[in-house]
Amino acid sequence: AASVFAYFAGENIDAIIIIIIVFINASIGFLQEFKAEKAIEALQKLLAPHARVIRDGKHISIPAGELVPGDLMVLSEGDKVSADCELFEENEILIDESILTGESMPVRKDTEKDNRLFMGTQIAAGTGKAIVTKTGMRTEFGKIAALTTETKKDKSPLQKELAHIGVFTGKITLGIALVLFLIGIFGRGQGIVETLLFAVAVAVAAVPEGLPTTITVALALGVQRLAKKNAIVKQLSSVETLGSTTVICSDKTGTLTKNEMTVQEMIIDEYDITAHGVGYEPRGGFSIHGYHSGSESEYLEYEKDSLHELAHKKPLLYEHFELMSRSAVLCNNAKLTEIEEQWKILGDPTEGALITLAEKAGFSVSGINQKHKRIHEFPFDSKRKRMSVIAQDEKTSALFSYVKGAPDSLLPLCTKIIKDGRVVSLDQKHLHEILKHNDALAAKALRIIAVAYKEMPKSPVGGKYIKESAESDLIFLGLVGMIDPPRDEVKEAVRLTHRAGIRVFIITGDHGLTAHAIAKQLGLVKTHGANIVTGEMLNEMSESKLLGFVAKGQETIFARVSPEHKLRIVNALKESGEVVAVTGDGVNDAPALKRADIGIAMGITGTDVSKEAANMILTDDSFSTIVTAVMEGRTIYENMKKFIYFIFSSNIGELLAVFSTILFGLPAPLTAVFLLIINTLTDVFPALALGVEPVERDILERPPRKPDSKIIQGAFLYRFLAAGIWKGLVTAAVFFGNLWVNGWRFGQDLNTDTYLYMQSATMAFVVLTLLQMVQAVNSRSLTVSVFRMKFFENLYLLAAIVFSTVATILIVQMPIFEKYLKTTALTLNQWLILTAAAMTILVFEEIRKAVFSRN
């Protein structure tokens, strides 16, 4: 608008310069955001899955998106199912459906009763072939994706805040421009074009043209920093939203925990054995507690390399330990591998934990399998809750049945037990002891597996092995308690969230007691009486009661929940006025991820749907990275306050300087071109540098800002008004002072083409620019004295100040700019006077900060 009015007023050069400055201003913001979006697009292209199919009799690998109904898909352990399909051939296949159901236990599938496989699930064990029935949005996976697309996404707090600032600035600008236009037309009898140009110049002074660019670049730099810290942010505004988060709804498996089942405790005979170490790395020792009637507890410590000492000190216990490890290894389909110095499991996590235990104890898994050939397997199923394997001893050719399963399923099949190395009858006393130990392990929220074995007849019954024969009259060996351990770094991250005033809710598809145990270990709950709300309870629960469970002061864990439940919990939190962050990796998490203020998907285990719905993706799947992102978000918000304070105080100074001329009927001391140069060239770069001010030490000690709080309100408004008024008064004083010294007196006319006006306007431009440079240093903290801050901590700010100051000197002193910008070269004395005048803002701000600190 200023360019158009300048053109019609005959100021063609001004019109061109204004357009060039506005174009530069817009280009900076566009290019920064464009680069950020392109980086995110490049990341998403790396996520394309593939599938193995049989076409024209050949096994080929194709992009999963090219699957069609009727394709024959080949499935192996570790594969992801890329479409809904039906098994027509299988070999002991187990499916991990946790991505849809939240259940971590694999499900047995067969070609008769339950042959349906769903897109997004994973083959935990076995192999098979299936015919594709549904693809894309027609799959169960796709239906949840459709629910996600229908979920409304709210504006971020930053978007709301920028809208507020825009309305605030717009109202003031339009009001001032209208008043000036009316005064010019009716009060001073000026022409319409001249008056419009003057009014637009004031509007230019009031509107912070550099603010959108500064915010965009500050957020883009935040995105880049977070990417280096394992957090990929998809939308720029999400960076700041993290800083205002008040509640984090976290999944348990893989986020708070390692997603690696680990044996923690075993009960063998009268010994309680604690296994050390977590995950699938076969290293760690054992603590052995012996309980003997009428005597004190024994306590023994053994590492892997010295466990053979147990064979000398406690030979019967060692033999029992070896037999139990052998049973767990043989009744098992998992494989332990080391890939790039990382130990991983292929197959069922529970079985992986058992073979890791055996290796940790020094019993070679490969050696056991070589010495005991597996003859037949009765796979685990949800009804029997157990698995059996018949194996033949290499030396004696004897057949043995090895069984593992849930204690309540396996104990009724046991008639004997090993005590002190002898096989004795399993009487009520022994059964009572086992159940007592079982309850003790359950109280620790461990997943409990019972192990048993028996010697089989030399030949199969009727030439065929049957389950009843393999799973009857068993000898009970012991109990194994395991858990998915919490991540090492999460406990400290949880402590930081509490310091930061952020509440954390666990929302999981797993068992409530398991989630409670993890929460207790991590410090997420501090009492034993934390609420455990299940999906079934939510079905019967009213909205008001749910609001009570998510209210402040309540420690609540949500377990066995469905996608609809998770979405409902997020809605309840948002209704309570919370800024909600939700983590998740499965398709079932996607609707809640989208509904949340900030959805956080897992980069390693997450699905494409969850990543699409989320605002941020964690490349390390760790909860601690969320805390790092929160710290970054809060820092960005605080830095936004600093550069908004810096920019608005400058604009107030410009407004006051321009308004001062109205009282005396003089031309504005700052032309539209000068105002745009200040707002773009000398404001933007220091403001950008303030946007990367280092993290303040106490950033996580402060509570989250209230969702409805505004930057421009209360004390913050008074601060930049006071600083702006001071800068405006100093600028006006320099303008009028130079006129007075050179013979001008109040009441006289002043032509804009005279040397005196151009010199005075140049001095006003220079002093306002220098005031801005000093104010940039003041703005590093709104409360702390500049003399208490590290001067070289923000080198970007020092570079920006040097650049803007040098640019101002060149604009003023170089002859080419005198012609086009109507500036005049200044003497050394004038530069010194203007520098001294600019330093007054430092004194003013130090007094204000001192008064503020005392209050």
Image: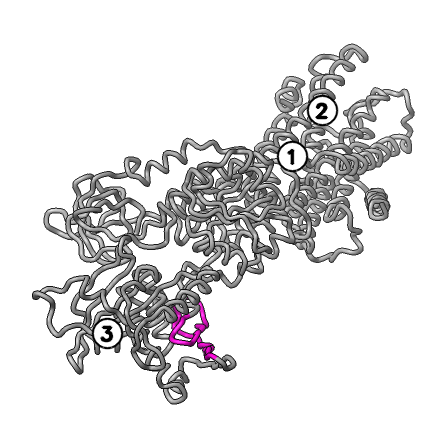
**Is 294 on the left or on the right of 54, as rendered?**
right
Mark 3–mark 2 Cα distance, whole angstroms, equals 81 Å
- Is residue 268 rendered magenta in the image? yes
User: Which disc, if any, is residue 369?
Assistant: 3
Front of the two marks 3 and 1: 3
Mark 3–mark 1 Cα distance, whole angstroms, equals 64 Å
Asked whether residue 329 appears in the rendered view, the answer is no
Mark 1–mark 2 Cα distance, whole angstroms, equals 22 Å
Residue range highlighted in magenta? 266-293
- Residue annotated with mark 1: 708
From the viewer's side, name the closer residue of 53 and 502.
502
Colouring = one colour
Disc 2 secondary structure class: helix
Q: Position of residue 628 (x, y in %)?
A: 57, 54
User: Which disc, if any, is residue 172?
Assistant: 2
Residue type at mark 3 is: Asn
Disc 3 secondary structure class: helix
From the viewer's side, name the closer residue of 542 and 63.
542
Q: How crowded is mark 2: few (under 14 residues within 10 Å), some or many (20 or more)?
A: some
Q: How crowded is mark 1: few (under 14 residues within 10 Å), some or many (20 or more)?
A: few
Front of the two marks 3 and 2: 3
The quarter of the rendered structure image containing the C terminus is top right
The quarter of the rendered structure image containing the N terminus is top right
